[in-house]
Amino acid sequence: MTQDQIILFSLFGAVFALLLWGKFRYDLVAFSALLVGVVLGVVPAKDAFSGFGHPATLVVALVLVVSAGLVRSGAVFLITRTLVDSSRRLGGHIALMGGIGAVLSAFMNNVAALALLMPVDIQTARKAGRSPGLSLMPLSFATILGGMATLIGTPPNIIIASIREDALGEPFRMFDFAPVGGITALVGLAFVALIGWRFIPSRDDAGSRLADVAEYIAELTVPEDSKQIGKRLAELDEDAAKTDVAILGLIRNGKRRYGAARNTILQADDTLILEASPDALDEFRAALSLNFADTQREERLKAAGEGLDVIEVVVPETARIAGKTVERLGLSWRQSAILMGISRQGTRIREHLRKTEVKPGDILLLLVPTGRGPDVTDWLGCLPLADRGLTVTNDSKTWLAIGLFVGAVIAASLGIIYLPIALGLVVVAYVLTKIIPLSELYDHIEWPVVVLLGSMIPLGAALEGAGGTELIASTLVDLTQGMPSWAILTVLMLVTMTLSDVLNNTATTIVAAPVGIQMAQSLNVSADPFLMAVAVAASSAFLTPIGHKNNTLILGPGGYKFGDYWRLGLPLEILVVAVSIPAILVFWPL
């Protein structure tokens, strides 16, 4: 080995060891390794930050922003509220939720797809009276599997396409991954839904690890052009049940109605009295196109700023609002804020929210102009609850958000426009149409992943330039000498899978993809089947909670232990290899 190769292998070894140790965050580890490489002269100074402008880095960042836009527009609610049913058998529920998760993660970041569906899955488990741990792991694995099917579904595919462009002059296109990744995902989903979930240990107390979410008494108003006008209040029960909302009654002309209100024909400006969590309340409002209780003030809030935020605050005894009503305090005209709901344990609120005296210990749900949450909280003298990322769904722009995204995907798939440019145009359109407030634009980008990618790409290029990947490839070729092609691909997949189970799949891909290309060149065959093998293997991190962020996300809510993952993950990884190798040889022959 040359001196440069020794230095680079040592750097990568140190990076992998530190990532396994987990004491330092992965972006700091990768960035430090890049700087050390520059100082030691193995990474040219002029190329040190080239990874931050690399197409793979830009696409990952843009996909996260687009995913947030699809959430804010209500596109995801549109799917889940029509399909999810808590009375469905567990196997059927896993198949349905897994299918939704797989489809979503094929067209958006798979971490974002899980983040969207996880609360839905937890609420469904609560309604069905079962542990969320029985369905969260299958859902996580399904979103990982679904990402294999398209270019933008998972970072490894994006990186593989970019590496192919650098090495062979042309990247993979949007749906080039579909034949292999799609088949693997379908078979994996079928296994998880029919058999695999039975391998998950059942713990009755798993749900107790979830933080309690406050239930609010809230009010929503029927707008003048609503489709709900003319319906009986009882006819809304089905939508309410799907979104986990309880309808308590309604207010008409300032008078509250109970009991007999179930048969009341809804009219414009009727106010529904509801009990729900913040997320459920927003989903119900978006599903039925209802207004916030204070419509006029809501319109003024929208006109005054670029968006709305939802915040939760606790009322201490010393708060300015304690012992007063929001109407008396002048909350709306003094602070441009609207009271959406009050959570008061053990007491049913009988008055109109604006006329209800706020008591110490109450939790208030407030609608405020974007960015004004801390100021309003301080003015009220309240204490903020931990930020749970509550947002206001802009359901009037659902189809606009979907149309812009679908148009970009089609244009990129047909080669009309370069994918990063297409996604960039979608982001700009989302901001201009206020689907995503400009002030929140950069909040949705997972900067540690961007730093990881931007740091590892120059290191990977330096390793390849120094002949390091060729050395690894030749070693693997020597080890597989005389073996059939399927066995060679299997060895490459197993090595990549092993790395991906204990390391970040992005770092694994950056190292393994050039190795695959070098192996193909050594064997004088096409590099595409080797790249496809790396793409599938790098995404197949099912054995540990640290192999993929989705697995980490479900660790607490599912009540899992570190050793629970391999019970379902090991047979799934074996199945992935058994299915993907023949598929690769058929669709991407050597």
Image (cartoon, helix red, strand yellow):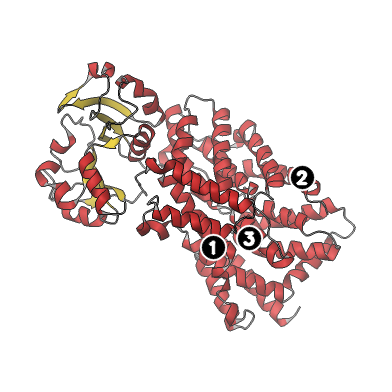
Residue 10, relative to residue 284: is it above or below?
A: below
Q: Which quarter of the figure is the N terminus placed in?
A: bottom right
How far apart are the alpha carbons under marks 3 and 1?
11 Å
Whether residue 564 appears in this view of the structure is no
Pick whichever of labels 3 and 1 is earlier in the sequence.
Answer: 1
Q: Which quarter of the figure is the C terminus placed in?
A: bottom right
How far apart are the alpha carbons under marks 1 and 2?
30 Å
Q: Is residue 197 left or right of residue 353?
A: right
Location of residue 218 by image quarter:
top left
- Secondary element at image label 2: helix
| Dot 3 alpha-carbon crowd within 10 angstroms: few under 14, some 14 to 19, many 20 or more | many
Give the residue number, with chain letter if any, for mark 2: 583
How far apart are the alpha carbons under marks 3 and 2?
21 Å
Q: Is residue 497 left or right of residue 325?
A: right
Q: Nearer the viewer, residue 486 or 502?
A: 486
Q: Is residue 486 left or right of residue 461?
A: right
Mark 3 and mark 2 residues within 8 Å of each other at the beta carbon:
no
Give the residue number, with chain letter if any, for mark 3: 159
Q: Position of residue 300 (x, y in %)?
A: 22, 47
Viewer-side label of 1, 2: 1
